[in-house]
Image (cartoon, rainbow, N blue to C red):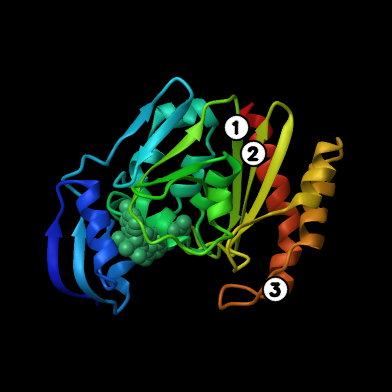
Amino acid sequence: MMNIDRYVRVSSLYEASDILRKDKAACILGGCGYLRLGRKKISTAIDLSLLSLSYITETPTTIEIGAMTPLRDIETSSLIERTYGSALRKSTEGIVGVQLRNVVTLGGTVAGRYPFSDILPVLMALETNIHFAESGKISLEKYMTEKAIRDVVEKISIPKNGQKAGFASMRHSETDYAILNAAVGIKNGDYKIFVGARPQKAVRAPEAEDVLNSGRSFEDTGRAAAAELIFGDNTRGSADYRKAICKAIVQRAGEEAINAV
Ligand SMILES: Cc1cc2nc3c(=O)[nH]c(=O)nc-3n(C[C@H](O)[C@H](O)[C@H](O)COP(=O)(O)OP(=O)(O)OC[C@H]3O[C@@H](n4cnc5c(N)ncnc54)[C@H](O)[C@@H]3O)c2cc1C
């Protein structure tokens, strides 16, 4: 269980960033789904709930999702489904149960960069940007490969440029963590492929993308992804098992993406 010395419900993003900057053991609270499973000692717990950061809105060029938005709102958003297809819904609807998804947040998911995450590969396939309070805008794909930024996630933005995505995963049971997952994005006939829960964090599969973008089948594409990516062992599955199912998971995600167009 986490241990909190001081609790502050901030009234501005600036106040939250200021506390984070000055207090090395301060911590932002999202929905606390993951935080409360650990034994973190938190000097100052920063609650963003007064900042109206739970929203899904549309601008002329993007859809923006606030950091405190629960995953359930993303799962059930008709705006998101209409704009990008069903991948974001499909990547969230398998996470434990509705009660948890009503509580865990987009901000905690993005800041946590969890390797098992189902939603992160889809967001990367959809060219998502993260907006930090002080550090500004950075592409999620780039952020996943860099050192974590100690800053407040304010929102994400997803371009509205005609892109769609497909998602597929393999799990022992419906609500377990994925053994492997994949997201395929398609924009103007060009594909992007991300594979996650390897069990390492989601990465892009550029050779598989070349195969698909040269007009070959989803089956060949899945085979190329299995050949180029590195897989590991954990209690859910071995590296060999992950490699063996990668072809089918990438193939299914690709077919889902095409169906969304
Ligand atoms: C039992 C359980 C099972 C799960 N299974 C799955 C699964 O199968 N697939 C899947 O994709 N996900 C799964 N998740 C993860 C879940 O979807 C969330 O990604 C996770 O709980 C983090 O969201 P949170 O709001 O709970 O974050 P918290 O636990 O509150 O925070 C997580 C981290 O993010 C930081 N943080 C939170 N908000 C911000 C912010 N705005 N700015 C900066 N830093 C911030 C916190 O300081 C902390 O370090 C599971 C979670 C739980 C608890």
Inspect the image, locate mark 1, and give the three-letter code of the amino acid beneath it: Lys
Residue highlighted by disc 1: 164
Q: Residue 45 sits in which quadrant?
A: bottom left
Q: Residue 99's mark?
A: none
Q: Residues within 10 Å of mark 2 (few under 14, many from 20)?
A: many
Quadrant where the N terminus is found in the figure: bottom left
The answer to whether residue 88 is above or below residue 95 is: above
| The disc label shown at residue 239, or none | 3
Q: Is residue 175 visible?
A: no
> Which quarter of the figure is the C terminus placed in?
top right
The mark closer to the camera, 3 or 1, is 1
Q: Residue at x 68, y 32 (%)?
A: 258
Residue found at x 26% / y 41%:
53
Horizontal and vertical percent position of residue 107: 36, 51
Residue nearest the observer in this picture, 35 or 172: 35
Which three-letter amino acid code belongs to the residue tagged 3?
Ala
SS at circle 3 = helix
Q: Amino acid at mark 2?
A: Gly
Q: CA distance from mark 3 to mark 1?
A: 30 Å
In the drawing, what numbered circle is on residue 185?
2
Depth check: give the residue in front, 206 or 195.
206
At horizontal 62% and vertical 73% (from top left) the residue drawn is 237
Q: Is 20 rendered above or below residue 209? A: below
Kindly check if marks 1 and 2 are in contact, taking CB atoms under 8 A apart as contact. yes
Picture coordinates of residue 122 (x, y %)? 55, 45
First in residue order: circle 3 vs circle 1 = 1
Ligand 1 has an atom within 8 Å of the beta carbon of the residue at disc 3? no
